[in-house]
Image (cartoon, rainbow, N blue to C red):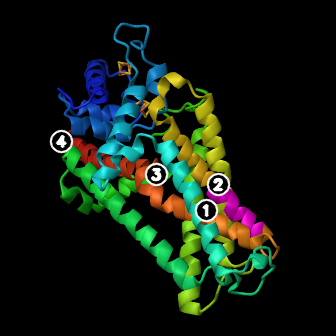
Amino acid sequence: MHATEALEEAGRLMIVCNSCRYCEGLCAVFPAMEQRRFFNDGDLNYLANLCHSCGACFTDCQFAPPHEFAVNVPQALARTRAESYAAYAWPKFMAPVFHENGWAVAFAAVASVAGFIGLMGFSIAPRDIFATWTEPGAFYRIFPHAVLAGVFGLAFAYAIVALIMGARNFWRDIGEPMATLAQPVSIWQAMEDAAQLRYLDGGGDDCYTGRKTDRRRLFHHLTFYGFALCFAATCVATLYHYLLGREAPYPIYDLPVVLGALGGVGLTIGPVGLWFGRWKADPVLRDEKSSGMDRAFLAMLFLTGVSGLALLGLRGTPWMNLLLTIHLGLVFALFVTMPYGKMVHGLYRFLALVRYARESRELKVQE
Ligand code: SF4
Ligand code: SF4
């Protein structure tokens, strides 16, 4: 007996697949499955978080509907995965946020932008909303640096703690010992797999079209590395501020601007590509209940990227103050919703890859 219907179905399919094993070369899920005879809930959550929902095993399956076995592994694992996000949420009372995630993230974004506009109303006179300020420190005429550092520092610290606690819940549930996290070779292998999205293409075909292209990987890379570059830009700007005493906005050729601009381009193009890819993909592969979560996450990343690029392009103009306020509101909403949205998939998938690296290595030694 499994805890939920989704886990029950995933368990049934893993028993069918374990007898068949036709898909063992497609991704990490099948080799990991083959190392087990029985599947408890933790095993199924582990396998679900290894899966990229590429759909290759559905396309290849001779037991897919209308066959009476009705095997649809991508959909069953997508449902299991979505449920696992809520099960690992910290604190526990935040779990329902995953159930209506699209609305929750949209509400957080609107409330956050409205809050920052309200703060702007307190800190500058209405006639200055469209004032043109260009000197270093111009951003901080609207929001003092200490206020920004405090507000964003707290939001970021909370998000990190909540993500770490969620990761701990995942790790406990799948029954993996803490010692695995101290194995550099497993961590390194997982980092390589994650950085290359090694298993995203389900054995070589594009996840959206089934043709030999790699669009989903490309858009995923643009999104991930776009986010990483934007984060790096923020870190460099923080070092500039505290170590060199240099205040934003920086010249166009300066490192924080270059990193932020490249990251913004990635965050703008990547989510658009992933959104249209989702739209074109066969709905039978998806868990429709988590569509809102996927779309909300992509929309947040896109809006953050676009507003950052707009701020970069229009700074030194009368639009800068308003654009800065909107951008900060979106970034704040992105931070606080990080532990309660699709962002967690990267964390749990990475941890699942760490376990997979450890298991694969031990299996090779035994052979
Ligand atoms: S998805 Fe279908 S073809 Fe692939 S291993 Fe499972 S039962 Fe076999
Ligand atoms: S990653 Fe692709 S091939 Fe592997 S289980 Fe998921 S949908 Fe199937």
The crowd level at tag 2 (other Cα within 10 Å; few <14, some 14-19, many 20+) is many
Residue 198 in the magenta stretch? The answer is: no
Range of the magenta residues?
304-313
Q: Is residue 154 visible?
A: yes
Q: Quadrant of the C terminus?
A: top left
**Which residue is the site of mark 2?**
303
- Whole-angstrom CA distance, mark 1 to mark 2, is 15 Å
**Which residue is the site of mark 3?**
343
Q: Which one is in front, 236 or 79?
A: 79
Q: Percent position (x, y) of residue 297?
A: 53, 48
Identify which amino acid the numbered label 1 is placed on.
Ala
**Which residue is the site of mark 1?**
114
Q: In this picture, is 146 found above or below 111?
A: below
Label 4 near label 3: C-beta < 8 Å? no
Identify which amino acid the numbered label 3 is placed on.
Met
Q: Percent position (x, y) of residue 212?
A: 61, 31
Of tags 1 and 2, the one toward the viewer is 1
Of tags 4 and 1, the one toward the viewer is 1
Of tags 2 and 3, the one toward the viewer is 2
